[in-house]
Amino acid sequence: MIAWPSVTLDNLAIQNEAAKAHRQGCISPETLEAIRTAHPVKLYLPNPITRVGLFILTTIVVCFTTGFLLLLAISGESASLRAMLIIAALLCIGALEFAISQKGSYRSGINEALLWSAVGLLCTGIFFESHHVTENTIAIIVFGLTVLGTLRYADMASSAVAWLSFLFIIFQQAMRIPHGVQALPFLLMALSLAAYLVTTRLEKRPALRHYADCLTLLRILSLITLYMAGNYYVVRETTNSMFMLELQPGQGIPGGWIFWILTVIIPPLYIFLGIRKKDAVLLRTGIILIAMIVFTVRYYHSVMPLETAMVVGGLVLTGGAWALIRYLHTPKNGFTYAASDEPGMADRLKVESLIIAQTFTPGARSTDTNPTNFGGGSGGGGGASGDF
């Protein structure tokens, strides 16, 4: 269902792995070129600066085109405006499919601009002057559109919005059932944990290799939402603002001690599991969420002035980073200070064998500049002549 041919995406992954091997000095430039020739990639892959420029330019073109279509129906009824918005969205999808099929555009900035313009215009057209549409309905439609965008274009932003809209749908449904508010944090934590386990398993499936970036992002988001759903600050302030509890400073919420325990325990647990499993996603997410622990504790229990706390925290982090760099300068137990070079999807495709096959291709020309050529001698009578 993905828009690009699987063979082309596989070749791109192989070329990336071969380029990585070349940077590490494992293969020669000739071998790298041979691999690129054997696995061609017909995709338009601009650099990041060009991507940003193309994204802005495409967005401007979409805005002008949509504005022109709306001018054609400005004097009509709301149905005409709604129709023009939907037509503009369909034009964006058509332009996106054309750019992919004919020009090989891949994560070029054009794709993202056209995709999100189409989603925005389609949602605007559907909900234009619809005064009785509920937030739950909007979330369901956004969820459906972003799921389709993820499946078709492997767009990471679409997968993130799909996950957040799904949680919002669950949130809205839980608000309608008895005792749903009390169970909501634990329900969101359970769903986030289930999403993390499922995406971790799916990420290892070769059939879903082209969605690896989306699945990795969903793993990160599920870990973050799992923690946020049990964070004391998030639970207390959300409950206080939504239900007008008017809690006074120092006044807690029922069962607050449970959320305090979850607030303090979950990030170190992420770090522990990340170290044990050598999982960079768990490890880095846990390290980032440590800052949320500090923020939550300080928000309710100020131990020292902010300036002093920042200075002390900076000194501790700097000293800890320096000590860790010195300790891991020599690799220990699978950890090192050297730049990470994790295996990618192409390792599952046995890139090593492909590289070896390209290196020892039958009939390859020798690069020796001084070959020894035998033959061409002459002889006569009882001995050889002076010509060899």
Image (cartoon, rainbow, N blue to C red):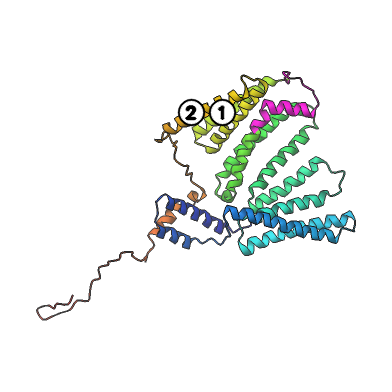
Binning the other alpha carbons within 10 Å of mark 2 as few (below 14), some (14 to 19) or many (20 upward) gives few
Residue 198 visible in the snapshot = no
SS for tag 2?
Answer: helix
Residue 233 x/y as whole percent? 69, 26
Q: Quadrant of residue 44?
A: bottom right
Give the magenta part as a residue range: 226-253
Name the amino acid, label 1.
Leu
At a point 60% along the width and 41% down the height, the residue shown is 199
The image shows residue 222 at horizontal and vertical percentages of: 63, 37
Is 211 or 46 nearer to us in this picture? 46
Point 48% across, 42% down: residue: 340
Q: Is residue 247 magenta?
A: yes
Few, some or many C-alpha atoms within 10 Å of disc 1 (few <14, some 14-19, many ≥20)? some
Q: Is residue 365 left or right of residue 321?
A: left
Q: Quadrant of the C terminus?
A: bottom left
Residue of label 2: 319
Q: Secondary structure at mark 1?
A: helix
| x, y percent for residue 240 | 77, 26
| Mark 1 lies on residue | 269
Residue 384 vertical position relative to residue 294 in the rendered view, above or below = below
Q: Does label 2 or label 1 sit earlier along the sequence?
A: 1
In the displayed structure, does residue 74 sit left or right of residue 174? right
Q: Quadrant of the N terminus?
A: bottom right
